[in-house]
Image (cartoon, rainbow, N blue to C red):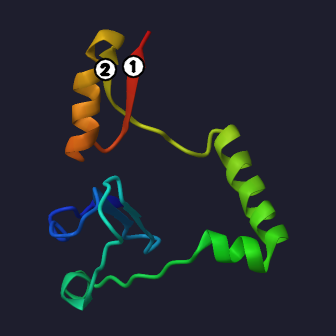
Amino acid sequence: MRRTMSTAVANMPFASVTYSTAGGCALARNSSNEGPWQIGPDQTYPLGLSVAGFSILSLAAADPQRLRDLADRAFRTVTEGGVELPVSAEFALEDAAQAHRLIESRTSTGKLLLRV
């Protein structure tokens, strides 16, 4: 089950945190020009969540073969249809400015398409 808990972390400078109650995974997206975000126990403990992360640059320096293997697996998953990319809005090319405003509002959760 996936949920978006943007209201629980509304004071954070990123678009949303999506987490899976089954797998316990979270994805934080920073779609702004603001600096790094911070999250603390007051946002995670009430929801029974914890936060962990890694640096892809550190992984590339420490174990480039592992990074290649992970990238190959990720690309294979995408090409085999294992990743769903929902489309939240579609715009005519002449409405590109409206699409850009939607992106800047940080309220959309899927992909935006421009018809050409």
Q: Is residue 51 at least partly visible in the picture?
A: yes
Where disc 1 sits, the SS reads: strand
Name the residue located 26 percent from the left edge and 23 percent from the top edge. Answer: 97
In this orientation, which residue lies closer to the viewer: 94 or 8?
Answer: 94
Is 13 placed left or right of 70 in the picture?
left
The residue tagged 1 is 114
Assign the C terminus to one quadrant of the image: top left
For image coordinates 26% across by 15% down, the residue present is 95
Q: Is residue 91 toward the left or the right of residue 26 in the image?
A: left
Task: Mark 1: give few (<14), some (14-19) or many (20+) Cα within 10 Å.
Answer: few
The answer to whether the residue labelled 1 contacts the one labelled 2, judged by CB atoms less than 8 Å apart, is yes
Q: Position of residue 35 (x, y in %)?
A: 33, 68
Q: 73 left or right of 96?
A: right
Relative to 104, say whether 14 is above or below.
Answer: below
Q: Amino acid at mark 1?
A: Leu
Residue 10 at x, y percent in the picture: 15, 66
Instruction: Indicate which label's residue lies in the foreground, 1 or 2.
Output: 2
Q: Earlier in the sequence, mark 1 or mark 2?
A: 2
Q: Position of residue 115 (x, y in %)?
A: 41, 13
Find residue 109 and report its horizontal and vertical position in percent. 31, 45
Residue 96 numbered tag:
2
Q: Amino acid at mark 2?
A: Ala
Q: Residues within 10 Å of mark 2 (few under 14, many from 20)?
A: some
What element does badge 2 sit on? helix
Residue 26 falls in image quadrant: bottom left
- Residue 80 appears anywhere in the view: no
Q: How far apart in space, not on screen, are marks 1 and 2 (Cα)? A: 7 Å
Q: Residue 30, located in which quarter of the rendered image?
A: bottom left
